[in-house]
Image (spheres, coloured by chain):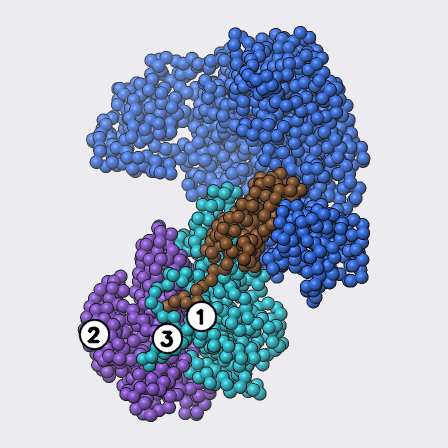
Chain colours: A blue, B cyan, C purple, D brown
Amino acid sequence: MSKRVGVYICHCGTNIDGMVDVEKISDEIGAQGNDVVVCRHYKYMCSEPGQKLIRDDIVELKLDHVVEASCSPKMHEPTFRTCVSQAGMNQYMFEMVNIREHCSWVTDNRDLATIKAKALVEGGIARVKYHKPLVGSKKPVTPAALVVGGGIAGLTTALKIARSGYKVTIVEKEEIIGGRMAQFDKTFPTLDCAGCTLTPKTSEVGRHPNIEIITKAEIVSVGGFVGNFKVKVRQQPRYVKLDKCTGCGDCQKVCPINVSSQFELGMATRHPISRPFPQAIPNKYSIIRDGAAPCQSACPAGVNVVGYMNLAGLGKFDEALALVRERMPFAASCGRICFHPCESACKRGQMDKPLAVCQTKRFLGDRELSKGVFVHPKKQDERPERIALVGAGPASMSAAYFLALMGFKPVIFEAAPAAGGWLRYGIPEYRLPKDVLLQEVENLASMGVEIHYNTPIGPGRSIDDLMKKEGFSAVFIGVGAQDAMRIPVPGADAAGVHWGVEYLRDSAMGKVPPLAGKRVLVIGGGNVAVDAARTAIRQGPASVMTISLESRQEMPASAWEVEDAEHEGVSFEHRWGVKQILSQGGKVTGIELRAVARVFDEQGRFAPTYHDDQLTTREADVLILAIGQKTNMKFLAPEDGIALTPRGLIQVDADTLSTSRPGVFAGGDCTLGPASFVQAVGKGREAAESIYAHLVHGGLREVTPKEREVPKEITPEERKRAQPIPRQEMPVLAAQERRGAFAEVELGFTEEMAKAEGQRCMSCSLCCQCGECVRACGPVAIDLTQRESIRELDVGAIVVATGIDIFDAKKYPEYGHGKYPDVLTNLEFERLCNAAGPTGGKVVRPSDGKVPQSIVFIQCVGSRDKARGGEYCSKVCCMVSAKQLSIFKHHSHDGKAYVFYIDNRTGGKGYEEFLRRAIEEEGATYIRGRAAKVFEQGGKLVVRGENTLVGGPVEVEADMVVLATGLTAQKDYLNVARALNLATDKNGFFLELHPKLGPVETSLAGIFLAGGCQGPKDIPESVAQGGAAAAEALTLFSMGEVEVEPTVASADRSLCTGCKTCVSMCAYNALSFSEEGKVAVVNEALCQGCGTCAAACPVAALRVQHFLPDQIFAQIEGMLA
Amino acid sequence: MSRPEQKKKLAIYTATGCRACEQGILDLNYEVNELGRFADPVFWPYVLGTPWEALSEGKVDVALFAGTIRTEADRQAALKLRESSELLVAVGACAAFGGLPGLANLADATEAKAGETTGSSSADGEGKPTLPRAEPQGLCLSQVVAVDYVVPGCPPTQNLLWAAVLALVCRGESPARLSYAAGRLPEAVAEAIAAGVLPRRGTTFAGEKAVCGSCSRIKEEKKFGICKRPYQEYQETGRCLLEQGLICQGVATQEGCGGICTGVGVPCRGCFGKAPAIFDPGAKMVGAISSTFDSKDAKEIAALVENFVDLAGTFYRYSLPSQCSLLATPDKG
Amino acid sequence: MSKVTLDALRWQDQPAQATITVNGGPPQVYFQITAPREVAAMCQGRPVEELPRILSILSPAHHLCAAQALDRLFGVEPPPVAQNMREALRLALFFRDHLRKFYFLVTSLENPFADFWSQDAQRGPHGLRSLLDDLMRHVSLAQEAAIILGGRADHPVTAVAGGVSRSLKEEHHARLAEIAAACRSCAERLGGFLREQVFPQGKILGEIRGLEAGPLTSLTLAPEPDGLVLRGAGGGEAERFGAATLFDKVGLHQETWSYEPFAFLKAKGWQDLGKVPADSLFFVGPLARLNNGQPLATPLAEDERQRLVEALGPFPRFEVVAAYWALLVELLGSAEGLVALCEVEKLSGPVLRTIPKAVGKEGHAALESPRGLIYHHFRTDERGLVVEAQVLDTATANNGLFGILAQRAVEASLARKEPWEETKKRIELSLLAY
Amino acid sequence: MSEFEPKIIAFLCNWCTYVAADAAGVSRFVQKPNVRAIRVNCSGMVDPSYIVKAFASGADGVLVGGCWPGDCHYISGNIKAMRRAPLLKKLLGEMGVEDLRFRLKWIAASEPSQYAKTINEMTEEIRKLGPFSRKKKSATRSVA
């Protein structure tokens, strides 16, 4: 079908016609026919007569395509599109050819320019024939806005939108709104108080019914499209309920922790529970907590170490013990035998020595035992359910404790005559005295836990029986690993050979063979082996030697235990393995050993190999083989229906500890293999929670999100915070007194020692959750169990006002910021001036508190310096310094102010006048030139620079130096950009749609920018942009619906093979793979029309409307014809 | 048994090529045992020994032409068959796109061995015979004469070959198995066959999408992090070969084969020619693969590209003479 | 001088024609291959691992030969299951190729689509019609086996460096065993028919009986790995050498009137085709393979070989009936081999490929294809791109022999004063057996 | 015959390089009149097929101009262009298109002088290379 194309060529006065022979082109094209119905040229096509020419032709000549050759489409494409649509033609049937900017203006050869212009027009004609009419679709708008950032720009936007009657949600990263402006003292050029201008706004925002503020929150992702965004917001816990907090401040009075205040730029400290300043909005407290401290994360039972150590530091031992008990019921035992991973994780260990956590805990436990009064938290209302617990080891005891607190009736069945399991029969008395254990067991019994001794569970009285016949509602299996692992060693049946775990159990029961005068050999490298050796040496043998496969470093036994054993006279030999046991007349005489080649394979798995040619023997009368331990599963009956893992352990769900039989739970060694006491206690508590959920809620507990962990590396800030107290050393029994005695070796802390140890804690989690504030809070507003949460918001427009950051002055080491305390950044100086600031508004030197007599301001720190900072001008620093020196001069009239500057840029209303006043009235000395260096000389700071106006170097003495640091993008700008799909420039500032015509719009329809996040701005500009962004959002709301551009991608189902090449191309998630259709699907509302997918699509099934391959190919051919 | 009034006259010829296509036509007869009822092969030199003169005995209804145009004799054969046939069908990748023999077009003239014959059009005096002169380069049939239908593939799969015979020779007269033949044909073609009308001229007897559409492999995510060559290790079954880092042209090749090669664990090399909407298969393959490079770093990308070899010989393996837009000469007619 | 060109000879490897010039004395016959095969130009610059797929256009067996050359080039040994799959494919191709030749033989003077079986005498379960049905069915069965094993039948794709690209599925195993058994009984039936009706008194064969080219040297694989053996016409060994040195022994001669070069033994030097005896030529193919006089491992084939030896002597001459008979021996042998190989355990295993660690520089392989010995030799650059690909195809090796056979056929035909049309058929039928 | 005037097709991104080209015009930076620009939304939209098409249709050079990495109006479209260029160059090279004939350049809206410089350099370099002609086989090429 033939097309009817009209071609119009503009002279643009002489702009085009001067260099291009418009008439000639027009005649040639008009003469060629080929679908071109008419070709006209005119002086000014964009003028009304020019446009009318086109409109009339469309109607009279029935044109179906129009080509217009004139200036850049960036200039007049909308004009002509409107023009053709006025004549009834679809605006996309039009093509604009640029023969001015791209042709007549850049050539000086008229012939070549004419050739080029004609080629361009031919390209347009060829292309336009393939154009198709396109119409966008309409979608309703959600009349609510999201403002990201609660600084002055965002607040302005929020207020304007809210006042117009629409809902606004402000998402603010910090705990309060106000942004940078809240930190300022006075503002230029009027020198009025920043707080006085800001607070009325913040408080209006705070109380406006249409505004909701979400503090401590960030945008995670944005879905949807203009008018219909779905925004995910991640909120960090505030720990203080906004609706309950009255702002009375009782909480912060009792807070034991002091950390440096970010709001004050580290020039003051704050309590983790606090508010930055009294007028802050929301005018409520909040707690800053970085996450779980390494010690707490390391503890298998999850004990809040930081909390109770700090309480101990305050001398609040009862509260400390209560906090321990939330996770660890047996403080006295744990304090003795725990392998304390908390101490290994303690960050203070990176500086001097870790806190003596374990011993402090023991102190807390012992203190209670010595008082003889057992305090446990209040039990919940009694419940009818009885829970059976199998085994009276640590796991069961822990579960029983927590079950009892929940109101259940726990009943423990223990095969042995005493409780404690491994604690009782595995751990020698010198480490855990029996009476300590006994008291903890008695305390448990006092809570209503029944313990039946000598009552084995097994066939005859199986778990099945417990549930079916005896009416237990749930069962917990907490059996330990108390059988010795036996390996076939030749000669192991000789008299005098003992197995490690059994040997320990026998000694605990007093059934140990006499060892006096005998040579004892212990085989093994684990804790059982060392315990056995240390037990043996207390029985008066001639010698005790331990032989391990592993080297000293590889040994799994705790290093300090090995050391203690050596102190007590145990000798060690390493890297020998048993070949056979030598015996005579059925009695052991020694052992033959072979050298170990390696213990672990490349993957670190235990897989020993030996040199069979390197043999040796050791003589011995008694041999203890301590090569491992295992759980005896004989107590399980087939009808119990409890599944085991391939390793022979009870199979449990990792989160709920539920076994394969509903209602039966298990924890401790029988599920983990030989593990530690503290792990068993942790599992016991988890099982209790699961049992509670199972019986009370009828389902298993939901897994609560784990608190994030604080970084493991110590920070400089923490080093500063650490109090210089040495670690308290535990008094011990002298080594010579230990042999032959089972008296406890470690003697325990005193109150003073415990307190001192507690004060050593740096509280690297910031808030330690000691609970002091909770106890002090009258309105019960504090909830320390809060966790981060995700909220989803539906909004129609998003205004991004995330603000600016301050350039890090340390990147200019020659200026000495951070090295000399009296070199400040201008924001730090601002806090000094501020009446609510760290000095109460006195401008004094941080080093000595003296009032400075001379201050040097250094301009352009981080600005206009491509090498180290931004290439751009930060815009406000000239005025900031002029303002600050004026404030300084108002404080001390005789003071001298110097400014090293490059250019003074004061392009604002009243700005230049303000600067002139600073120079002329305040008498500041402006030196043109970059300062080269700041150094100390004779107790004074000296600024060396160059005076480029007079030429030559200059040195100025100063009491204080203020660096006019530049403004930079927020450090986390990329997170915001990614979450919102915003484009940024190379400095990290968000890209506006057009630098002049679209300053607050972004390339994403419905997402707007305001304030410093788009580039350095002063307050008036930020406010103006805030207003402009509000107007954009309001325009959207008042339109009620949005037209979705038709120049978007579409997928041809008849071509698409579902290869998924395109899916990862789309930066807007507009492309997805339809599982039903097995084809790609375009969400046209999300598509921005970039065409990346179309270029990648291997079958050309994806196309962007108005940029179809046919159209481009035709244009190429036309241009080259 | 009713027979059509007049059997269609059939011509079958192979120019320069391997004869697998003719074999395929023979196999049709073996398997379907139907063709003879509808068609008289009046001209089939390589199977029946028919001389060229047989062509002058009246118009042929359908000519099935296989092989690349490589010599003067091939060109003459194409012209003669075009002249004497109602419908001329390009059968197989060689006739359709140039095929493997066309690959030789890439080789540089200077690299060919010296002293080899180029064919001679005149006897050299000693009574020795002449040899048809070689064309400057291998061409596909449509570059020499107008072609009515195309049956692609190297060789064409039996079902599509049969579909073409059903459509062009039997014209709805055959009760034979359409569903077997029409498995992957576009609906319009299948309907035309069923209705006994000729499909639109220019129809390619192939599927309507690309090979991926019928390939059994699992596509998860296209992220090209490493360029593997087929001798390197990869999974025989399961995941998409391209996603495993192998160049596989299934993404941009017209379907119809059912993904035979990918199904047996070797990458597609495009014997069905480019998928219908594509301009140039090499450019599209470049676009599709490189777009998914798993890097944003120019150096990393350069290193990745370093591992690609012989793009032209791979992307235009079967279609160099006609579908490589930088080498191709335009079609005739 | 008169000149006749018999254009487009029936079904050969390559498009070919025969030109006969008579210039006074005896007629001079030129067997001309009329289409160029640009193996070097096609392969040069390709990644070497692509050659099995490219070279399969010469014949499907070239796919396997190229894959073997790749094994050597990459220095990898295919796992047993892969070797078995490749061998099974090779045997299936043997069966299909040979069976096709018999189909053509049986239908030789007729149009394959015509009702040539309509005479009542040829009806019935043992008639010709039933036999042809059987042949057709088994060609397509062998084709199906080749598709299962090779992915495609005519241009297989599955043989890759170090093994094969695909494993067989359960249903494939069952089907292959079925096909193999069917093929064996088909071969037996065909053997019976040929023995009874064709070889002794077959009308068709009778006409070209006695057409011989011999005595000729034959080139086959040696029993030891990677070795080749040249045998004299009497079956005696002339020379044994490593495959790698093939092109040291064999030269290629180019004539202006044929696109296909003529292979000859360098030791003897190139001699004009008219020279008798043609002792610079050698010959590959089924007959060449039987020329060693050794018993075959498979019983049916060995029985048939015994019959052949009884009838024609221990070292069959290069004569047409012998050539067809040799095809029958191999047809039986390949069917038997297929039966033996198509067992689940021989064609299944977890490892299908030995993955090469590095790209080698050079590789070669010689393989017995249905039409005779073929040989590949590749050289690559450090990236594994082909620098040189030398190929000896059966069309090249037997080019001279075909010339001689064509000459004999024309002479015989002229002697009987047959029309050219008959002469052409005579040439076609005599060449077909090779 | 007058001097060879190369024909260069330029695909310019609507947001950076097209703007730079406009700005170059506004600033009257004199440029060789050899470039014919096609405005595209993003350099990531430029299908390698377009570039091949341009050469096949008689262009002597092709320029793709996009935003600097990190500045893409469509977040990362230019990264896709950056990924495609080297592989496309390799293919073009095999087809006989010299390296200098196809270029991918990052030219920001703020770099009009850079745009003019690129155009001028490219024109002169391609002028030296001479017209692009499709790889032609010599008629006497031997075959075997």
Establish if D17 lies above or below A956.
Answer: below
Q: CA distance from mark 1 to mark 3?
A: 16 Å
The circle on residue C33 is 3
Which numbered disc, 1 or 3, marks the residue closer to the eye? 1
Front one among A961 and B38: A961
Q: Position of residue A835 (x, y in %)?
A: 69, 14
Respond whether the residues carrying marks 2 and 1 are from the same subunit: no
Front one among B253 and D110: D110
Residue extending furthest toward the front: D1
Establish if C210 lies above or below A832.
Answer: below
Q: Position of residue C235 (x, y in %)?
A: 20, 75
Disc 1 element: strand
Which numbered disc, 2 or 1, marks the residue closer to the eye? 1
Chain to which mark 1 belongs: B
The circle on residue B135 is 1
- The residue to which callout 2 is attached is C232
Q: Position of residue C271 (x, y in %)?
A: 24, 75
The circle on residue A25 is none
Is A912 left or right of D68, judged from the image as shown?
right
Q: Quadrant of residue A244?
A: top right
Chain to which mark 2 belongs: C
Label 2 crowd (10 A; few <14 / some 14-19 / many >=20): many
